[in-house]
Image: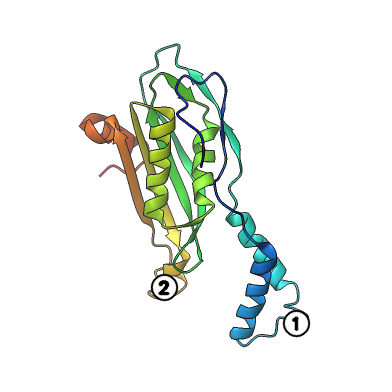
Amino acid sequence: MTGGPATGLAGPLRVVRDGSGVDVPAAERAVAALLRALGRDPAAPHLAETPRRVAEAYAELLTGRPFALTTFPNDGGYDEMVVATGIPVASLCEHHLLPFTGVASVGHLPGERILGLSKLARVLDHFARDLQVQERLTQQVADWLRDHLAPRGVGVVIAAEHQCTSLRGIRAAASRTVTSALHGLLREDVRSRQEFLALTGTAA
């Protein structure tokens, strides 16, 4: 992702993903080859469109959507926590290419600027549209908000179910993995950390 710190910006920060996109025709050929390797005929009537559908689905899942990171001057000097909870999150496990889905909570203690509330979910979605592990996704969102918003504190909690464990292997259906990343006062100050975890429903 590109863009510098949002603190003090006169206008919104344009957020785009660096790097090349998905080669859909190559992915389509690869899916057809995979079907053959699995003992299936990709030319069969019920599978003829499957390579295209799968390739286009993965391209959608792996393509981040550009957006403008809108911030506003904290003219009122608001110094309490801002937390968005219940944000849907979906990504692809990089180990098995199977989805993991769940909910996230993202919060910050504002500094000089306040972030547009919908942008917390957009930053999360932008990083989730990649081959991921949940731990890295959680850390990436927290690090990015710290570096570009310059708040006094940032916290991210993700609780997700992984199909690589619910559909295969141990087949632990309905089990959830919870990860967190904290920066600034949410990490260093015990009361701020406890408040954030209580607001997100993850306090002990």
Q: Dot 2 surroundings within 10 Å: few (below 14), some, or many (20 or more)?
A: few
User: Residue 169 lies in what quarter of the image?
Assistant: bottom left
Residue at the disc numbered 2: 171
- What residue appears at the point 51 percent right and 21 percent down from the top-left corner? 9
Label for residue 1? none
What residue sits 57% from the left and 22% below the top?
11
Q: Earlier in the sequence, mark 2 or mark 1?
A: 1
Q: Relative to 116, is 136 on the left or the right?
A: left
- Which color scheme does this rendered protein use? rainbow
**Which amino acid lies under the numbered mark 2 shown in the image of this protein?**
Arg
Crowding near the residue tagged with mark 1, few <14, some 14–19, many ≥20 C-alpha atoms within 10 Å = some
Residue 186 in the image, given as x and y percentages of width and height: 29, 33
* SS label for mark 2: loop
Residue 144 is left or right of residue 58, and the answer is left
- Residue 90 drawn above or below residue 111: below
**Horizontal and vertical percent position of residue 161:** 44, 59
198 or 88: nearer the viewer: 88
Cα distance between the residues tagged 2 and 1? 32 Å
Q: Quadrant of the C terminus?
A: top left
Percent across and percent down for residue 172 are 39, 69
Give how far across and how far down residue 63 sits, in percent.
60, 52
Q: Which residue is mark 1?
A: 43
Q: Residue at x 42, y 38 (%)?
A: 144
* Amino acid marked by disc 1: Ala
